[in-house]
Image: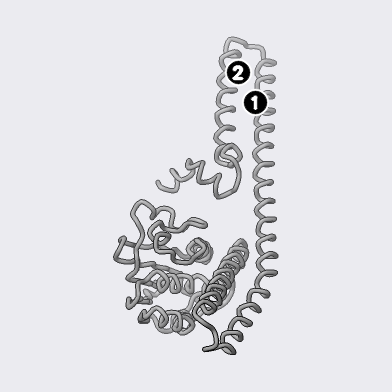
Amino acid sequence: MNKFLEQFNFKKAAAELGVSVWQTPNVLFLVMGIIIALIMAILFYFSKDYSDPRVLIISECLTAITLLSVGSSIINSVVDIARLNRLKTRFLELASNRLKDPLATMRWELEVLLERTDGDLNVKQRKIVDSIVESNESMINLVKDLLDIARIEDLETIQGEDLINLDALLRSIVYENKNYADSKKIKVDYENEATGYHVQSSKKLVKIALENLVSNAIRFSRENGNVAIRMKGNGEKIKITIADQGYGIPDSEKNYIFSKFFRASNILAHNIEGTGLGLYVVKKIVTGARGKVWFASREGEGSVFSVELPLYNQDQK
């Protein structure tokens, strides 16, 4: 029912496609249906008293011409939107790739600077350098998210053919985020009850999705908090839950949590860095891999994000 009603949220569709409301496919199809119904009603009204077959032929021709004209307009609009989306994706990929290397070089040079001047900088100088490092890191994260969006546009790429050991993948993600968690004094606890299970998809993209969820759980948790990662399997599907003790999500904003560039108001109030793209990327990757992702959250208490993926079945080969 929600999916059906979502089709009539024309403003949201227009915002996602970057076009006016009147250019969205759903509105165009609705207008097309109304026009055809009106023409058929008018033609029926004027031709019902005529027995001449020529009247019927002319009526059918007029209906067909109208249908073709409106249909052509809709098809052209959809083609234009698809073309613009493809150009946008190419631009994002090109721009992000061009920005990635200079930013990485800048980070390396900043690290060298800090090592060589350790203890020689006064408080003001150290504050300036730390601000540059923080800005550089924010730009690197933004470029990373933009590259992720460019990668997930292709459904075949998401589905992939890699045989993924999720236990090993999650352990590597926890290890890679250890320093980040330690810097915030957050304990990350990982427990696996599905040893030996595998899924088939793109390993690189599945890692991006799970990494986003783990890093989000750490980022949005308060100091001295806990992040609990659990994995369970039932023979057909594997479920991963990532629970934090962070700020939670306001009830009025839960419907927008997987939207592009959306950030919860309580997170903005705490000035926590982010692009608002991470969960959008997670949703696209997980659904593209024939899985599903959902969450439960209470503001002020934390959130639990769950991912369910179909297990690899050797018989499907």
Q: Tell me the kind of residue under disc 2.
A: Leu
Element on which disc 1 rests? helix
Q: Eyeballing the image, is 202 above or below 290? A: below
Q: Eyeballing the image, is 220 above or below 10? A: below
Q: Is residue 69 visible?
A: yes
Q: Residue at image x 57%, y 73%?
A: 132
Q: What separation in Å lies between label 2 and label 1 (alpha carbons)?
A: 9 Å
- Front-lying residue, 256 or 56: 256
For residue 135, the mark is none
- Front-lying residue, 128 or 101: 128
Tell me, yes or no, whether the two marked residues, 2 and 1, touch with CB atoms within 8 Å: yes
- The answer to whether 151 appears left or right of 283 in the picture is right
The residue that mark 1 highlights is 63
Q: Residue furthest top?
A: 49
Res 196 → quadrant: bottom left
Q: Eyeballing the image, is 190 above or below 97? A: below
- Front-lying residue, 271 or 50: 271
- Which colour style is shown? one colour
Judge the density around disc 2: few (<14), some (14-19), many (≥20) Cα neighbours within 10 Å: some
The residue that mark 2 highlights is 43
Q: Is residue 316 visible?
A: no
Q: Residue at image x 49%, y 82%?
A: 176
Element on which disc 2 rests? helix
Q: Tell me the kind of residue under disc 1.
A: Thr
Q: Position of residue 106 (x, y in %)?
A: 64, 77
